[in-house]
Amino acid sequence: MIQHTRQLQVATRGKGLYEFTDEVGGWLASLSISTGLLTAFIQHTSASLTIQENADPDVIADLNDFFGRIAPEDNRLYRHTIEGSDDMPAHIRSALTTTQLSIPIVRSRMVLGTWQGLYVFEHRSSAHSRRVVLHVFGE
Amino acid sequence: MIQHTRQLQVATRGKGLYEFTDEVGGWLASLSISTGLLTAFIQHTSASLTIQENADPDVIADLNDFFGRIAPEDNRLYRHTIEGSDDMPAHIRSALTTTQLSIPIVRSRMVLGTWQGLYVFEHRSSAHSRRVVLHVFGE
Amino acid sequence: MIQHTRQLQVATRGKGLYEFTDEVGGWLASLSISTGLLTAFIQHTSASLTIQENADPDVIADLNDFFGRIAPEDNRLYRHTIEGSDDMPAHIRSALTTTQLSIPIVRSRMVLGTWQGLYVFEHRSSAHSRRVVLHVFGE
């Protein structure tokens, strides 16, 4: 069994989903692991990770709208407002999604379904560079 | 350290939770791993995985109702409507739950709490056969 | 590669977030694992795990309020009411957050971001002792 780690930077430009499936797949292709487990972890509390359909851009837009409805930018709802009206909704959106994904590897590839892609889900309005730590082990 | 992978098919018959704890437990019982980590990953974006109470069927029905209220089948809310009125709500329900679960193994069994069971959470209205990939490693 | 497991007890006093980052960090410091993966799993369906900002207590209070709004203690909404008006909302809150977290370890420490902390998210109104199972492997 061997293991490797790596840090990715994913550039975001406001709320929405940013795919990084290819960056992970490219890294895996450079390693000699045919069976194992890949874990991605995002080092932030106002952006998260999600696996979603990567076929129709409307899915991504609708998802973003949904989270805007459920956790609106309305300062009257929150105590924590000093970092901007998008900050507390960002923490809520992060809690509702996830900080970490683990995906089995079979025949040297992540076992993603046909339409599945890995995304950083940016919850802040401005541009950010998001750090995602990858860990893989196997043989 | 050794590792194994396996693919399960879980048959669903409309929105709701379908337990597959025993399928995983049976597979683990056939392996020689006393301490380790089990990961389950669902290869879909309109069904997800969750750990819930497996004692009272009302919990399952209430959970399903809750997700119906929060992500209603109302096409006026969504752009992505061509795959049916249940499809975009299914993607939202998937984002709110999770695609993957990892559970430690101690004394050859998953360390589930007394009332915890593993479920496929089906978010589409019609019947499907859902693929869940299992990965386990340990010794 | 080596692995270890441990069970933590986290005392809660009503709905809210209870940090246990230091308990995990202290345990890791006592082990000889410089690179690896740490998994925490909570053995309950009415409390969950989350990674959140540990800087401003208002974030924690606002998060708790949000989940109170989205899954209110209103028995008219639920079938499952015999365990108290806070029980079915607790199951919903658990489904919306997560039962398990996996975090890569680099240079003998979890790769948490600057403001990230590990929390038990208690969803019941009364005090509980929550069991969290830790698993770590690496070298």
Image: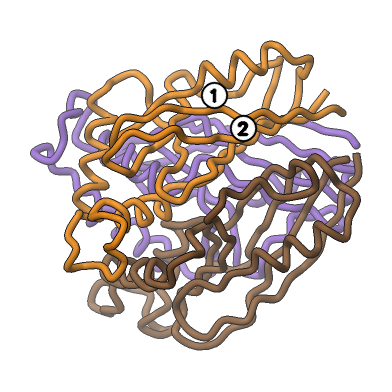
Chain colours: A purple, B brown, C orange
Residue drawn at 57 percent across, 48 percent down: B113
The residue wearing badge 1 is C112
Disc marking residue C123: none
Task: State the image quarter where residue C107 is shown.
Answer: top right
Q: Nearer the viewer, residue C22 or A30?
A: C22
Near mark 2 (Cα within 10 A), the count class, few <14, some 14-19 or many ≥20, is: many
The residue wearing badge 2 is C103
Q: Are marks 2 and 1 in contact (CB under 8 Å)?
A: yes
Q: Position of residue B17 (x, y in %)?
A: 50, 72
Residue drawn at 65 percent across, 76 percent down: B10
Q: Is residue C130 visible?
A: yes
Q: Position of residue C129 (x, y in %)?
A: 44, 32
Near mark 1 (Cα within 10 A), the count class, few <14, some 14-19 or many ≥20, is: some
Q: Amino acid at mark 2?
A: Ile
Residue drawn at 60 percent across, 24 percent down: C111
B79 to the left or right of A119: left
Q: Nearer the viewer, residue A83 or C85?
A: C85
Check the image and report above or below for B134 versus C1. below
Describe the element under mark 1 as helix, strand or loop: loop
Q: Amino acid at mark 1?
A: Leu
Q: Read off the chain for label 2.
A: C
Quarter of the picture containing the C terminus of chain A is top right
Q: Position of residue B29 (x, y in %)?
A: 83, 58
Q: Is residue A7 visible?
A: no
Q: Nearer the viewer, residue A120 or B29?
A: B29
